[in-house]
Amino acid sequence: MDTILFHNCALELLGTFIMILIGDGVVACVSLNKSKGQGAGWITITIAWGLAVMCGVFIAHDSGAHLNPAVSIGLALAGMFKWGYVIPYIIAQLFGAFLAAITVYLFYKDHFDITEDKMTKLTIFCTMPAITGHQKRNLFCEIMGTFVLLLLIIAIAQNNYPVSAGNAPMNLGGIGAFPVSYVIIAIGMSLGGTTGYAINPARDLGPRIAHAFLPIKEKGSSGWNYSWVPIVGPIAGASLAAFIGFIFNLCSFL
């Protein structure tokens, strides 16, 4: 691994760690018994998740701050990111998310221990649908949410902000973090009610693995029968956004 790629992967790991620490942290704060934030609701979660992404972007701006395998794949398809960087970035993102989920559990362990509902505990780590038994529709929801996310990222990066991530032409650092955060909040408030808007395979899979791994009291299933949806859906949505970006001349190489 060359020096630039190692540096970028380290930033992706740390940036994803911060994003998931704050994002999963707010779900724990709002959901777990006797937390001071218990019952604060969906608006709190969506705003905090947007701010969590912003914090992760500030940390990882030199790497391009993808923090999301779907973003890395979509940008590579759009010609805005080197394919040779995609797998190392995804590994770093998954590991950062995994470590952050473990940290959230340790932080809120006393509250996990006194919370009885198994689904509440699981959805702190990963997403599950509001209505079960409709995985095709859930897949559609994840595709559309991620499509909106990546299309806006492409437009923001191309039209307003500098691009440089080592040898990979993509950077959402600095002021670019703010509009991306607003996009995340808008997606959560409008399109998040069906699946919990994973829109990020690492955000879902890394913490789901942590849930399976951790000795959580009365934790129940890790929801593996649903886990493919927040992986396939975001990648498909990002691919669609890359195609639409190409057609509408949003991508930087056109």
Image (spheres, grey):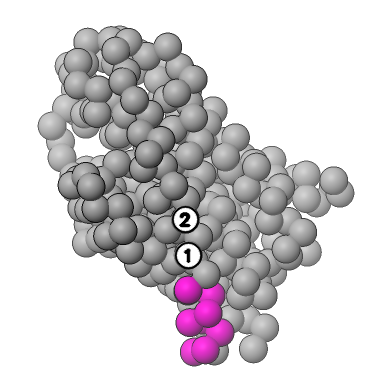
Q: Nearer the viewer, residue 246 or 41?
A: 246
Q: Position of residue 195 (x, y in %)?
A: 27, 50
Marking on residue 59: none
Query: How dense is the environment of label 1, judged by Cα within 10 Å: few (below 14), some, or many (20 and up)?
Result: many
Residue at (22%, 10%) from the top-left corner?
114
- Could you say which quadrant of the image residue 145 lies in? bottom left
The three-letter amino acid code for the residue at tag 1 is Ala
User: Does residue 179 appear left or right of residue 167 in this picture?
Assistant: left
- Check the picture and name the quadrant holding the C terminus: bottom right
Q: Badges 2 and 1: C-beta atoms under 8 Å apart?
A: yes
Residue at (68%, 56%) from the top-left corner?
86
Number of marks present in the image shown = 2
- Residue 14 visible in image: no
Residue holding disc 2? 232
Residue holding disc 1? 236
Task: State the SS at label 2.
Answer: helix
Dominant secondary structure of the residues highlighted in magenta in the image: helix
